[in-house]
Image (cartoon, grey):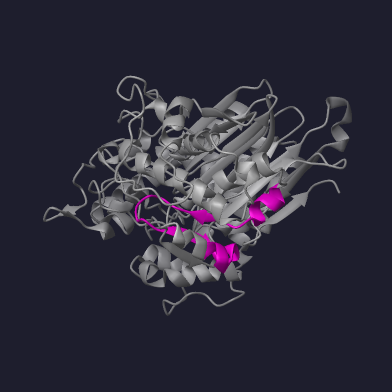
Amino acid sequence: MLNRVFILLLLGLPLGQATERTGAAVTVHPLATKAAMNAFERGGNAVDAVVAAALTLGVVDGFNSGIGGGCFMLIHKPNGRFVAIDGRETAPAAASRDIYLRDGKANPELSRTGALAIGVPGALAAYDLAIRQHGNLSLAEHLSQAATIAEQGFALDRSYLDRLGQVVEKLRRFPGCARIFLDVDGNAWPSGHRLKQPDLAKSYRSIALHSVDWFYRGPFALKTEQWMSANGGLITRKDLLGYKAKRREPVRTTYRGHEIVGFPPPSSGGVHIAQILNILEAFDVRSMAPGSAEFVHLVTEAMRLAFADRAHWLGDADFAPVPKGLASKKYARRLAKRIDPSKAAKIDAHSTPQDAVTNLFGKHTTHFSATDTDGWWVACTATVNTTFGSGVVIPGTGVVMNNEMDDFSAQPGVPNAFGLIGAEANTVAPGKRPLSSMSPTIVLKDAKPIFTVGAAGGPTIITQVLLAVIQVVDYGKSPTEALVQTRFHHQWKPDRLLVEKTLGQANIEALRAKGHTVKVVNTLGAAQAIGLGQAGKPFTGSPDPRGRGVFEVSGK
């Protein structure tokens, strides 16, 4: 999924020094960063800053995320405990396993565009739960601040216009969307156009006034049901009424003296980042140059083994048996023996961990991050999936609806929009949550958080986060240095290694000599990271150097 990632960090000083309280934030848009700063100034904590940024990004970066989509939020509390809030979309009650089959074959267009592509949105429910249980401010305050931006408008930058230009044809098909994001001739807005979204502002203010019930029980639910009925969709008011954000237990592992905490299924990120790191512990990674063919080959082979397992085992643990053994040290040692330093291995299928039938993840169940001296760290990834999601805006609401149903396996073995293959574990079922690559992650040392990272970019989210963790733990890099490093990605199928051109031609040829099919790309993904600071600075943050992110500190 093309998730929008934003990471926030805040520092709260002891009560006696409240006037010296400092906050910091890094997001992909200056207005979202400013929203986080405003939350700090109004007495908000890390959770407030995250939600303020999330709702603002739904206005200024709505092609990537918003309340018509979903999210995963990972929270470290001052008492050392973790909370994982699952705001992933769900399949409507009328959905069925074969919903996207026509004449026995999957029709990918049905799960990517239009009414059948839309899952029941969960982001708003997750933000509401997080604020009610952990925030200092009200959800209404954050909604009102973001609504003002939607009313007054903002200038479209190059990044926004590039993404808009890619989906003009899709948006033209849906008048509710075209009326907002295209001009009267059905073309993308010109550079510098000030985009105003009065309908979205009204929706935000209605939720602020009437609570999230307006969205899940009231007028929005009714408008959604009416539009779905008229356009061949399945979502009803009952689907929205029944949606619940879930609290889950995080995935935890250790790596070279650090604890790595990630998100559990229906995220595949937490499981497979843990799995790959466990495999790599069998090798002397530090002896390899981080940009060498030797290093890339080793990590790639671990990626291939993990993604083969992902294709078979991973799905919503409320519906499918997902083995906990995938993230075990013993299983990783077995897989590590399959890696040949000299050549790419033949990996035809998944492997099977011990107790795969009995030891399962429990049936209960953006990236933004934040911390303060009380011990709050928050990491959250949000999305509407591909650019502008399904292309649908429910008329009169301004809400861009996701196309998250494409993250299910429409037909076992048939790839989705990102080339990912799934099996029975990720087939469509009523109320089920599709498998996700979103990977909000927090790294601890001596039981204290030291680093948080998340990313955007479909399945490359997993490998971006993985590589950032390796750079910090194995090579001692700062967040900025970690994100600058060359990225690469392999997801087993298709059997292709993506590498950024900065890897260099000599290393690329060396990888080809080891048997890899290499495709060179200019850039890969978009990650944001924050870590503990040095030289008297409490924290350091870095937007992705490949993007347009902004890092800002309050009270300067």
Where in the figure is residue 350, as x and y percent of width and height? Answer: 32, 39
- Is residue 104 visible in the rendered image? The answer is yes
State which region is magenta.
479-508
| Identity of the residue drawn at 41% across and 26% down | 324
In the image, is residue 77 above or below residue 462? above
Camera-side residue: 195 or 109? Answer: 109
Q: Residue at x 41, y 76 (%)?
A: 186
Residue in front for this viewpoint, 102 or 68? 102
Q: Is residue 119 magenta?
A: no
The image quarter containing residue 132 is top right
Given the current orientation, which residue lies at the most extreme left position?
Answer: 103
Image quadrant where residue 256 sits: top right
Name which residue lies at 68% across and 44% down. Answer: 475
Residue 156 is drawn in which quadrant? bottom right
In the image, residue 190 sits, relative to residue 136, either above or below, namely below
Q: Is residue 490 magenta?
A: yes
| Residue 368, x across and y down, in percent | 61, 44
Classify residue 485 as left or right of residue 235.
right
Residue 546: horizontal and vertical position, in percent? 62, 62
